[in-house]
Image: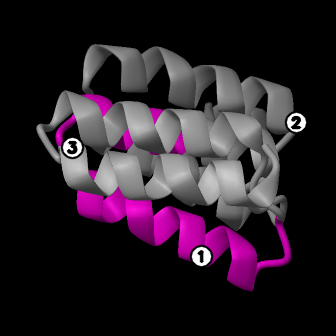
Amino acid sequence: MKETSCGSDHHTYNTMINIYGEQGWIDEVAGVLTELKECGLGPDLCSYNTLIKAYGIAGMVEDAVYLLKEMRENGVEPDKITYINLIAALRKNDEYLEAVKWSLWMKQMGL
């Protein structure tokens, strides 16, 4: 995508993250994320949700949890999809107690 000289928008980058993430190609996901940041866009809510899902597929649950913290620090408020993706990542990687913890957090937040 670099040939386009940052002519892409969030939708294009998020689509690429999703495609690579569903295949478990985390290096390619990281490359798209780097490109997104270099273009000055930075991740949006959809980007973070898709990244959390991709990290879960790749078995990188610690990174998925970190992304939740990062998005808050960057002023992006997690939504129901964020927590659903995080809980799915935790369950997929046998982190059941953490999944329950986040499920209870969702309930407490009214999501």
Asked if one can make out residue 71 in the rendered structure from this viewpoint, the answer is yes
The label nearer to you, 1 versus 3, is 3
Q: Which mark is residue 96?
A: 3
Q: CA distance from mark 2 to mark 1?
A: 21 Å
Give the left or right position of residue 58, taking residue 18 as reference.
Answer: left
Q: CA distance from mark 1 to mark 3?
A: 23 Å
- Say which quadrant the C terminus sits in: top right
| Residue 42, quarter of the rendered image | bottom right
What amino acid is at disc 1? Glu
Give the left or right position of residue 38, taking residue 10 as reference.
Answer: left
Magenta residues (range): 51-76
The label nearer to you, 2 versus 1, is 1
| Residue 80, quarter of the rendered image | top right
Q: Which mark is residue 9?
A: 2
- The earlier-in-sequence mark between 3 and 2 is 2
Q: Where is mark 1, residue-wise?
A: 70
| Residue drawn at 22 percent across, 28 percent down | 92
What amino acid is at disc 2? Asp
